[in-house]
Image (spheres, rainbow, N blue to C red):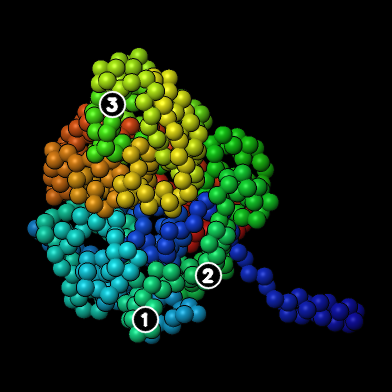
Amino acid sequence: MKSHRCHRLAWLILIFALPIQARTLVYCAEANPQTFNPQLATDGATFNASSNQIYNRLVQMDNKTMRVVPSLARSWETSPDGKTVTFHLRPGVKFHKTAYFTPTRDFDADDVIFSFDRMRSKKNPFHFIGGGEYPDYEADQMPELIKRIDKVDNLTVRFELTQPESPFLADLAMDFGSILSKEYADNLIRKRKLSDLDSLPVGTGPFIFKSYIKGRAIYYIANPNYFGGRPKFDKLEFLIETDPVKRMRDLTSDICQIDSTFPPQTLAKIRGNPILKVMAAPGLNLSYLAFNVERMPFANLKFREAVYYALNREEYVKEIYSGQAEVAKNPIPPTMWSFDRTTPDYRYDPEMARQLLRKIGIPSGFEITLTCPKVERPYNPDPLKMAKLIKSDLERVGLKVKIRALEWQQFLKKSRAGDLTFSLQGWTGDNGDPDNFLNNLLSCDSISSGNNRAHWCNREFSFLVDRARVTSNVRVRTRFYKKAQKIFHREIPWVPIANNTIFKALRKNVMGYEVSPFGVDYFANVYFK
């Protein structure tokens, strides 16, 4: 009996002496990040790789209520005139310790001021690192809005604004509001390695950056000091694969446990797989066909109207989204407050399109180029197929269409530069405010930021959107936004195509994941069953 006990004890000692394999969550990502500094970007691939894993903001949006909730700021108050917002910062928040930086102090007001000063001030040594353009910060008119930022004490920061701004808090929850480490930036100045701030990131978020192999993978480890609680697994890996078929194969083989996106046509097959599950949520998104209205023939409203009539968008929803999306008619999603349900939509009418083209003297066979990205997006699961359907519809009314498909980062670069005359675009809301669509994508001020792909400037539209920003009365804001939507409908800077439902495919043993209506992925609360 004694020998059996000794034998069993020896086995237990051996088992506990063996190293425990660290649990790793692998995410099948559809594209490379543009940078690891979300201040410089507008795309979901970059936000997923940076702001959603590495960084935090003063406030964040709750996925379920779509309300602003605390993050690095534990509370805040706004002055009676709406021009001063004071944030009380969370104490004891640690910056990441990495192979290239060891912090000596906690997060404080200096980090908040530095993060915004980089975008605000051309005198900041980091302002022009990475190109000196901050598209979402500029599109939300932050340069004109923020008058000054003051440090009241180590854990209190005061923003003074030039005017009351209703969406200000929601805007600060956007990715550009991610807080960087001033101490790390100061170290890089001494080392003369300023560009490392954007490629070797240091944040306060749930995961610590380890390394990046472009086109292959990004590696992170769990942050043991995360103020929101240490993640329940040890390592996070982004496996970068642009081919959706290969991503699904990797998911089925347990090479990855969550897929970034998949074609809706495979939905039934995934649901029938006993080792996978599908999660869904209404998306705050929109796919659209943008005209550069500064260039002919798209400067002609009748030409834009003809294209609108020529497109069978209901067929696109069937073919591209397998009926899991809605045909769009406004520049904001129907789930967003102030959506104008009275807006009449343009019907599918090829004969009307032909008549309009003849009326403005467009000859049969007139050639235009349609540009699309090669990679699928949450708002458009198959841009190339959609481009082919658009080509077929337009050629049916006498136009000749050449399709140009670009790699994702090249597509983004050309879109922001205004180099695309006719292109498939899309947007997923960064917060629950209509301003994020109407102002960010269509105002006159958003042309210089690169977010206004149509280069459309309608002063009446921009005036209404600006008026809506300076009041907190939701009824008044709604009235302004509905008038703005009617102008959009009349002037047609884009053809809205679809509002998509967001689907995610996961392994069944993955728990704690929430589908975000903002189309991005958070992994801090994920665990394995």
- What residue is at 31 percent from the left and 36 percent from the top? 291
Taking the image as shown, residue 114 lies to the left or right of residue 392, namely left
One can see residue 363 in this view: yes
* Location of residue 158 in the rendering, given as x and y in whole percent from the top left corner: 18, 69
* Location of residue 222 in the rendering, given as x and y in whole percent from the top left corner: 52, 69
Number of residues whose C-alpha sits closer than 10 Å to that of mark 3, classed few (under 14), some (14–19) or many (20 or more): many
Distance from disc 3 to disc 2, alpha carbons, whole Å, reads 49 Å
Q: Amino acid at mark 2?
A: Ser
Which one is nearer the viewer's eye here, 117 or 5? 117
Task: Give the residue pinned by disc 3.
Answer: 303
The mark that comes first in sequence, 3 or 2, is 2
Which one is nearer the viewer's eye here, 211 or 295? 295
Q: Amino acid at mark 3?
A: Phe
Residue 72 marker: none
Distance from disc 1 to disc 3, alpha carbons, whole Å, reads 53 Å
One can see residue 69 in this view: no
The mark that comes first in sequence, 1 or 3, is 1
Which one is nearer the viewer's eye here, 509 or 127? 127
Give the quarter of the figure containing the C terminus: bottom right
Taking the image as shown, residue 248 lies to the left or right of residue 373, namely right
Task: Give the residue pinned by disc 2.
Answer: 211
